[in-house]
Amino acid sequence: MTPADSSTRSPRRRPRVVGPFTARWLGAVKVPLVIHDLSTGGCLILSSLKSIPATHMTLEIDLPDRTTITVDAEALGLRSKGFAMRFVNVPSPIQARLGHAIEALLQKQ
């Protein structure tokens, strides 16, 4: 088995929902992004890039209730569909809003 084999991966600690979700990378300019997987701990940003554009990003994510959250994120690594980011230093109110949005989406599935 290879490390990428799903049977060798540890179970995810947090529930996640499959997007797409629209988002923006807030840098010198706003760069539009599409998020594929979203959890309270991070996300997968869809991309065809062969390298991660930055090790740290500030992301603005559109939630299904038509509100947005802003989170800081750090790169975890490349994946087949893009690159994984872990949310860091997320304030409790933002964490709660994200958790409620994910729970609502999971209940609809």
Image (cartoon, rainbow, N blue to C red):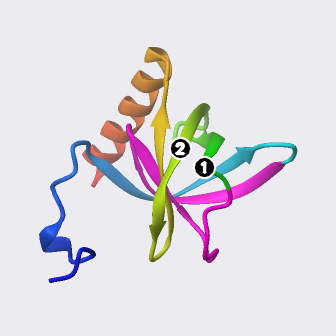
31 is within the stretch colored magenta: yes
- Span shown in magenta: 30-53
The residue lying at 58 percent from left, 33 percent from top is: 71
In the picture, the quarter occupied by the C terminus is bottom left
8 is within the stretch colored magenta: no
Does 87 sit left or right of 107 as displayed? Answer: right
Does 109 sit left or right of 75 as displayed? Answer: left
The residue lying at 74 percent from left, 56 percent from top is: 32
Above or below, 62 against 10 in this view is: above
Where is mark 1, residue-wise? 55
Above or below, 97 against 81 in this view is: above
Kind of residue at badge 2:
Glu
Q: Are marks 2 and 1 in contact (CB under 8 Å)?
A: yes
Q: Position of residue 22 (x, y in %)?
A: 62, 53
Q: Position of residue 10 (x, y in %)?
A: 16, 57
Where is mark 2, residue-wise? 74
